[in-house]
Image: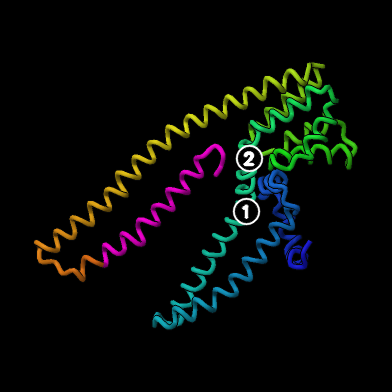
């Protein structure tokens, strides 16, 4: 724990504990996001940060508003309102930050699960007991959040003395991915009923791969549509706009000093910004995540 968090906890711990019922969702999100902070530490840190932010913002806004000649009373009122609003916005962002981490973890799991399933199926086919399967799989770092989930399961067994069933039940509650949760539930049920884990994992890996192929097909179809929109609206639209404004300036008597800045903005700012947004859209829609 950092000295900053210790200071925040010392100042606001009692207040946070008194309102703990309001932070039950944050408590759950912190566990799923694997942030190594208790809800008291996290919320206290957020409050202290907001207090410091308010202390910096208030005199700064007061000075800015006073320069505008708004009057002392009105400047103070606006400064308090603006500072408080920004602090509240920052606090809400702070409270929702674990959800962002959870979503990223879920995406990483679902992105790697089709390939991780193949490795799990291969290890299971060797006839090893379930706890050994997860122990071996946890050593593969290339599967991102899936490997980390396996490490958590192994750690629960080795460090806390849980058996494989208890460790799986704990992992089911912890994992943010619906697909991973369903997989762990199925593994847990197979172990409890004495089923053949190697056969189950072979079938499950094929299901994951088929779903991944379907997502790739959908992505390929959507990518074609995105490219058509990009070429039609942005590239051809920009060329048409440039030619049209040049013709209008020649026949309409419009000064080139008025047209050139618009064309300059279109070519060197608008098109690059839209292109970057398009790249982000394509990357976000990709099943591979990149």
Among the 4 quarters of the image, the one containing residue 176? top right
Q: Magenta region: which residues? A: 261-290
Q: Residue at x 80, y 21 (%)?
A: 191
Position of 208 compared to 192: left or right? Answer: left
Identity of the residue furthest to the right in this view: 161
Measured as percent of width and height from the top left, residue 11 is found at 74, 67
- Residue picked out by circle 1: 95
Whichever of labels 2 and 1 marks the residue nearer the N terminus, that label is 1
- Residue picked out by circle 2: 106
Q: Are marks 2 and 1 in contact (CB under 8 Å)?
A: no
Q: Residue at x 31, y 63 (%)?
A: 265
Q: Residue at x 43, y 37 (%)?
A: 223
Quadrant for the N terminus in the image: bottom right
Measured as percent of width and height from the top left, residue 106 is found at 63, 40
Q: Is residue 281 magenta?
A: yes
Question: Could you say which is closer to the camera, residue 11 or residue 201?
Answer: 201
């Amino acid at each position: 724990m950092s000295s900053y968090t210790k200071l925040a906890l010392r100042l606001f711990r009692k207040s946070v504990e008194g309102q703990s019922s309001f932070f039950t969702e944050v408590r759950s999100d912190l566990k799923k996001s694997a942030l190594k902070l208790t809800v008291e530490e996290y919320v206290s840190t957020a409050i202290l940060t907001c207090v410091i932010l308010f202390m910096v913002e208030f005199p700064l806004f007061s000075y800015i508003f006073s320069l505008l000649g708004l009057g002392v009373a009105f400047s103070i009122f606006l400064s308090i309102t603006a500072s408080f609003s920004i602090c509240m916005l920052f606090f809400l962002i702070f409270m929702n930050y674990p959800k962002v981490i959870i979503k990223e973890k879920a995406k990483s799991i679902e992105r790697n699960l089709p390939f991780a399933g193949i490795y799990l199926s291969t290890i299971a086919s060797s006839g090893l007991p379930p706890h050994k399967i997860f122990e071996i799989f946890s050593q593969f770092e290339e599967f991102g959040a899936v490997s980390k989930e396996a490490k958590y399961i192994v750690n629960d067994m080795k460090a806390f003395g849980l058996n494989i069933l208890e460790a799986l039940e704990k992992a089911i509650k912890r994992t943010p991915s619906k697909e991973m949760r369903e997989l762990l539930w199925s593994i847990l049920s197979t172990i409890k009923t004495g089923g053949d884990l190697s056969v189950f994992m072979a079938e499950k890996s094929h299901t994951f791969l088929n779903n991944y192929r379907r997502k790739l097909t959908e992505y390929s179809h959507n990518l074609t549509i995105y490219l058509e929109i990009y070429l039609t609206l942005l590239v051809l639209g920009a060329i048409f706009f440039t030619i049209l404004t040049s013709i209008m300036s020649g026949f309409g008597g419009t000064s080139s000093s008025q047209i050139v800045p618009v064309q300059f903005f279109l070519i060197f700012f608008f098109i690059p910004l839209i292109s970057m947004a398009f790249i982000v859209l394509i990357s976000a829609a990709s099943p591979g995540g990149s």
